[in-house]
Image (cartoon, rainbow, N blue to C red):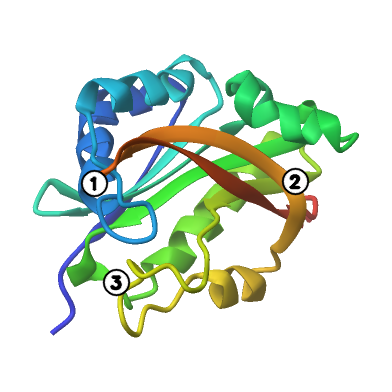
Amino acid sequence: MTPAYTIGLFRGPEITPWLDDVARLRVAVFRDWPYLYDGDLDFERDYLDAYARSAESVFVLAMDAGQVVGASTGLPLADDTEAFRQPFVDSGMDPEDIFYFGESVLLPAYRGNGIGHTFFDLREAHARALGRFGWTAFCAVDRESDDPRRPDGHRGNDVFWDKRGYTRQPGMTMRLAWNEIGRGEVDHALTFWLRGLEPMR
């Protein structure tokens, strides 16, 4: 039976009441492969600060009976931290031309119902409506294919992202450290994916 849910769209200052919910969801979902994140809510609130400060950020939230069960975020790359902007500068791309998608996190019981596509549809529509972005982008952690921690039968999102029109950019990578379960703070490589954003018709 398909779980009941609704989708809410929140822009700029409207996201502030939802920051704690998104922080908790990130901690829960990113604990699993491939991030293996031993989460910390204070760290999460610091990370989400860039979204709270941006007048043009967006949260797309999946909710069930008032509880946030999925979240997808975005903001102009120029409003994000230098660590996220620098790979674009190094590649000769202007951060002002990029709308950056943060995480899409969804509790397992709600997966497989098309919510992932809705997350992308609504964030792309938001970026397009702002009228000045040529690209949308996100990044994903790099893991070795033979990592023994990879769950049996795990299917990554590469095929889904490719079908959405995104292309992985080898070498366009940032470094980000977080606490891994059982390992403490570990430095990670995350590679960017890009898609040209067609204008509104």
Q: Label 2: how many residues lie within 10 Å, few (<14), some (14-19) or many (20+)?
A: some
Amino acid carrying mark 3 in the image: Arg
Real-space CA distance between mark 3 and mark 2, rounded to the nearest whole angstrom: 29 Å
Amino acid carrying mark 1 in the image: Ile
Amino acid carrying mark 2 in the image: Met
Residue 111's tag is 3
Question: How many numbered marks are there?
Answer: 3
The local secondary structure at tag 3 comes to loop
Q: Label 3: how many residues lie within 10 Å, few (<14), some (14-19) or many (20+)?
A: some
Marks 2 and 1: in contact by CB < 8 Å? no
First-in-chain label (1 vs 2): 2
Q: Position of residue 75 (x, y in %)?
A: 56, 32
Residue sitting at 22 percent across and 60 percent down?
Answer: 107
Q: Position of residue 139 (x, y in %)?
A: 59, 48
Q: Quadrant of the N terminus?
A: bottom left
The local secondary structure at tag 2 comes to strand
Q: Position of residue 161 (x, y in %)?
A: 59, 68
Residue sitting at 33 percent across and 78 percent down?
Answer: 112
* Residue linked to disc 2: 172
- Nearer to us of marks 1 and 2 is 1
